[in-house]
Image: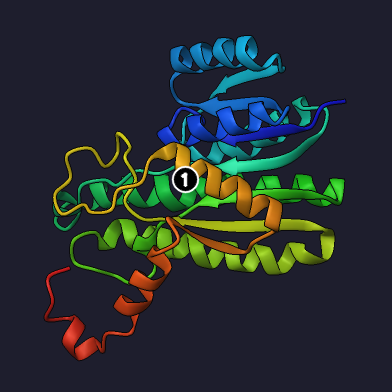
Amino acid sequence: MNKGAIIFGATSSIGKALCDQLAAEGYDLFLAGRDRDDLDIMATDLFIRHNIKVVTAKFDADKPQELPKFVHNSIAHLEDCSIAMLCLGSLGKQEDGETRFEEAAVTINRNFTAAAAILMETANAFIEKKSGTIVALSSVAGDRGRQSNYIYGAAKGGLNVYLQGLRNRLASHNVHVITVKPGFIDTAMTYGLPGMFMVAEPRAVAKSIIEAINRRRNIVYVPWFWKWIMLAIKLIPEGLFKKLRL
């Protein structure tokens, strides 16, 4: 019986790279995403190149009340689901969110509320199995609020705390939780954004995440140097920090 992995947000750039890495290691995959055509193309490609079982399903992250049932049915579909990956994310429009709460709510719901709904049901399913690894993509933006993206950062900061508590809760159930904090990644979400530097490729990020799973890391920055960049930012005194344009 093959190993199984489920990827929520499989059609994202990092999700696609992770699917390819897992398929190469012989995992059967359940791909969940918002674009049905893209999911079907991915499934065909992965089956042809890696000869694995691939199942796809469409879901809507903007309807979090529907997600627990969707997650329960999805995990049950795989014979041996040992890894669940959360690759959801939406930068949103900071400027619009500062004056229009409906715009801020979309960003918060996609990055935290939907993520919490998926993680809750995944955690409960893995507790029943008494094993498993949960990997969730957060962001370095959640480490400290900055004027350029504090709505997105607040949602990711909330996700970080949620994952800390989940990791604490699940440790006694033999379920491991990994928080992944990417910096600037070359994806459709970040395309054309000003001020980006040291941009990483999704394939390199996926490789780092797989390595983190194998090493049972708790929190991993990708690329690694973002740990030290964010440490320096967090150490700036608040009196000085509030005067900076970051």
The picture places residue 178, in percent across and down from the top left corner, at 61, 57
State whether residue 62 appears in this view. no
Residue 175 figure quarter: bottom right
180 or 119, which is in the foreground? 180
Query: In the image, residue 32 lies at what x, y percent?
Result: 56, 28
Q: Is residue 224 left or right of residue 148?
A: right
Q: Secondary structure at mark 1?
A: helix
State which quarter of the image contains the C terminus.
Answer: bottom left
Q: Residue at x 38, y 62 (%)?
A: 140
Query: Does residue 122 lie above or below 224 as drawn?
Result: above
The answer to which of 140 and 114 lies nearer the viewer is 140
Query: Where is residue 184 drawn, in percent x and y?
Result: 31, 51
Q: Please tell me which residue is depicted at 17% across the width and 87% down the height of the picture.
A: 240
Colour setting: rainbow
Q: Residues within 10 Å of mark 1 (few under 14, many from 20)?
A: many
Check the image and report above or below for 228 versus 187.
Answer: below
Which residue is label 1 attached to? 205
How many numbered markers are drawn?
1
Q: Nearer the viewer, residue 7 or 120?
A: 7
**Up/down of 100 relative to 78, above or below:** below
**Three-letter code, disc 1:** Val
Q: In the rendered view, tell whether residue 14 sits above or below residue 208.
A: above
Residue 46 visible, this orientation: yes
Check the picture and name the quadrant holding the N terminus.
top right
Residue closest to the eye, 200 or 4 = 200
Res 69 quadrant in image: top right
Q: Who's the residue at 66% across and 41% down the image?
A: 84
Residue 229: percent from left, percent from top: 33, 70
